[in-house]
Image: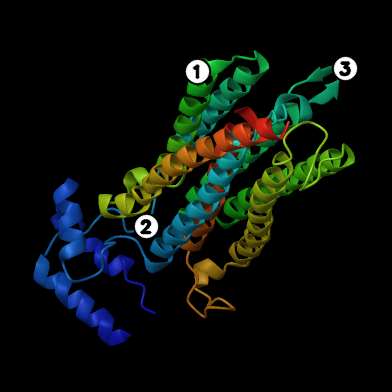
Amino acid sequence: MAQAEAQDRGLEVQVAHAPAATHAEGQQHPIKLYLVVWGWLFILSTCSYAVDYFNLQGYLRWTLIVVLMLLKAGLIVAIFMHMAWERLALAYAILVPPLLMLVFLTIMALESDYTWLTRILSFSMVQ
Amino acid sequence: MVDTTPEHAPHAASRLPGLRGIAADWSSDQRAFKNVSWGKAMIWIFLLSDTFIFGCFLLGYMTVRMSTTVPWPNTAEIFALHIAGREVPLLLIAIMTFVLISSSGTMAMAVNFGYRQDRRKTAALMIATALLGATFVGMQAFEWTELIMKGVRPWSNPFGAAQFGPAFFMITGFHGTHVTIGVIFLLIIARKVLRGDFDRGAPGFFTSRRGRYENVEIMGLYWHFVDLVWVFIFAFFYLW
């Protein structure tokens, strides 16, 4: 283990000698930032709830639900989970794979449309 | 295991930014995640796998809802609360959402005070987070009881498509389990903070690794993820 560390450090030293980073103490941000994000999450959640309360329907409803959801998710991941300050190598490694779910989503949407159609056809034949 | 965040930190300025940074970091025949410790990298990878679990649940729910020929139950009515003589749609779920968001806020501040080595504030905020989390689970237990009393079962329900029951119990049940586990771990870590384990670098009882205030951030990442999942469940299961 100590060997691995020494090797790792050796590699780093070969790469470059740079001045000390300011980041050594971990994620340090003003408390106010978290309070502002908290406030925004409240506002966005209230908007989500309003979509249902005022009984909006159709594409307007679905668009608003998804947009508000993505805004909330973005704030949580970027600020609360500090992804905005991580290096891109980590951010992409974590954030890109879930996009593959969209492929899965497309396949399952096609599949369920087909199932729905066969159900409609066969149920109507039974009656 | 060796944790090398501090050793790596001095060279931060020499690394390439942007897309070139991704290629350089991944291809350099060494650690890919330069300035995060193993603990943080691994919790992120765990959360990624958990994303797929919840993603599969939500996709399964989408599939059964799209393919059923029976109308889907109206969640706004089912989850309404009877207040002052009238039904307020989805109120219980809205309150649960605000409770969970608030717990994420207190958790984020706990992480912040942790890095400032403020033992008392960190522990107090973590305990507040745990209390909000427990409130959430309590409200969920109330919600489950209500629905079961109304006759919702994993195989049938009086409101519409039978698939509503299994989707509801599976998705909210799995999420509630995550919240419960989070509450337990919050209390464990809060106790360690109060005892000063992270100031002394005391070894953990399970891993024997020296405790650091970064453990609070790792706990926070899990907790924010639970909140994040709820954002998606709220949108797709309750509002859609």
Secondary structure category for the residue under label 2: loop
Tell me if mark 1 has few (under 14), some (14-19) or many (20+) residues whose alpha carbon lies within 10 angstroms of its own: few
Give the image's coloring scheme: rainbow
Q: Position of residue A108 (x, y in %)?
A: 48, 43
Residue B144 vertical placement versus B206 (above, below): above
Q: Residue tagged by mark 3?
A: B84
Q: Nearer the viewer, residue B156 or B193?
A: B156
Mark number, residue A59: 1
Residue at 16%, 64% (x, y): give it: B27
- Amino acid of disc 1: Tyr
Asked if the residue under mark 2 is in contact with the one under mark 3, i.e. CB atoms within 8 Å, the reply is: no
Residue A82 vertical placement versus A47 (above, below): below
Residue at 32%, 54% (x, y): give it: A93
Residue at 56%, 51% (x, y): give it: B223
Which one is closest to the eye, mark 1 or mark 3? 1
- Amino acid of disc 2: Glu
Residue B157 vertical placement versus A24 (above, below): above
**Label 1 chain ID:** A
**Label 2 chain ID:** A
Q: Position of residue B152 (x, y in %)?
A: 82, 41
For residue A119, what is the image quadrant? top right
Tell me if mark 2 has few (under 14), some (14-19) or many (20+) residues whose alpha carbon lies within 10 angstroms of its own: some
